[in-house]
């Protein structure tokens, strides 16, 4: 059993993208579902489907081949609106290339949306 389901999901997605698979399966949690929704809204994945198998449940993720790298940010840093640029330089390869996924009081969203709304939050993952 995995301790960090988000990290496991991001690693599974990255590995499936690297070998050219069209779909991949990740363990389903509410946090992973919210992160997948943000990735879908920004065009990094085609979609995802919730599948329940007895006690366990999972997401089947349809990949597009648009992901160069993705991962969970550990430890989960708290960030103010003014600090997003610092973390963009740390986790993303270039300006306006990729997104940071942030958990805010208004829900899980990208750092671009959080900056527009003026919200700080906890950094969860990066995708580019």
Image (cartoon, rainbow, N blue to C red):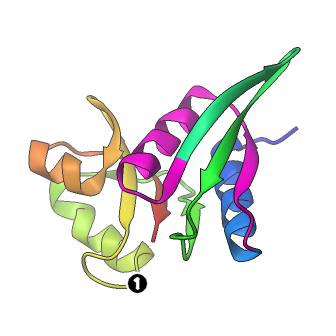
State the residue at coordinates (52%, 43%): 36
Give 119 or 97, whichever is nearer the viewer.
97
Please give left or right for residue 70 compared with residue 126 in the image. Answer: right
Q: Could you say where residue 123 lies in the image, as x and y percent from the top left?
A: 41, 52
Q: Residues within 10 Å of mark 1 (few under 14, many from 20)?
A: few
State the residue at coordinates (56%, 66%): 70
Identity of the residue furthest to the top in this view = 54
Q: Which residues are magenta?
A: 20-46
Please give left or right for residue 40 compared with residue 83 in the image. Answer: right
Q: Could you say where residue 112 lies in the image, as x and y percent from the top left?
A: 22, 56
Viewport quadrant of the C terminus: bottom left
State the residue at coordinates (28%, 72%): 86
Give 14 or 103, whichever is nearer the viewer.
14
State whether residue 74 is above or below residue 5.
Answer: below
Q: Which residue is mark 1?
A: 93
Residue 123 visible? The answer is no
Viewport quadrant of the N terminus: top right
* Residue 31 lies in the magenta stretch: yes
* Residue 29 lies in the magenta stretch: yes
Q: Secondary structure at mark 1?
A: loop
Q: Could you say where residue 69 lies in the image, as x and y percent from the top left?
A: 56, 73
State whether residue 94 is above or below residue 15.
Answer: below
Q: Could you say where residue 106 lies in the image, as x and y percent from the top left?
A: 26, 29
State whether residue 77 is above or below residue 49.
Answer: below
């Amino acid at each position: 059993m995995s301790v960090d389901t988000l990290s496991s999901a991001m690693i599974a997605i990255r590995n499936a993208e690297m070998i050219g698979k069209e779909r991949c399966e990740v363990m389903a949690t509410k946090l992973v579902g919210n992160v997948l929704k943000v990735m879908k809204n920004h065009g990094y994945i085609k979609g995802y489907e919730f599948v329940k198998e007895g006690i366990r449940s999972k997401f089947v993720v349809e990949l597009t081949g648009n992901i160069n790298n993705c991962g969970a940010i550990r430890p989960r840093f708290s960030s103010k609106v003014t600090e997003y640029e610092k973390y963009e330089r740390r986790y993303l390869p270039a300006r306006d290339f990729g997104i940071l996924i942030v958990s805010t009081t208004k829900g899980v969203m990208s750092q671009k949306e959080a900056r527009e709304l003026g919200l700080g939050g906890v950094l969860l993952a990066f995708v580019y």
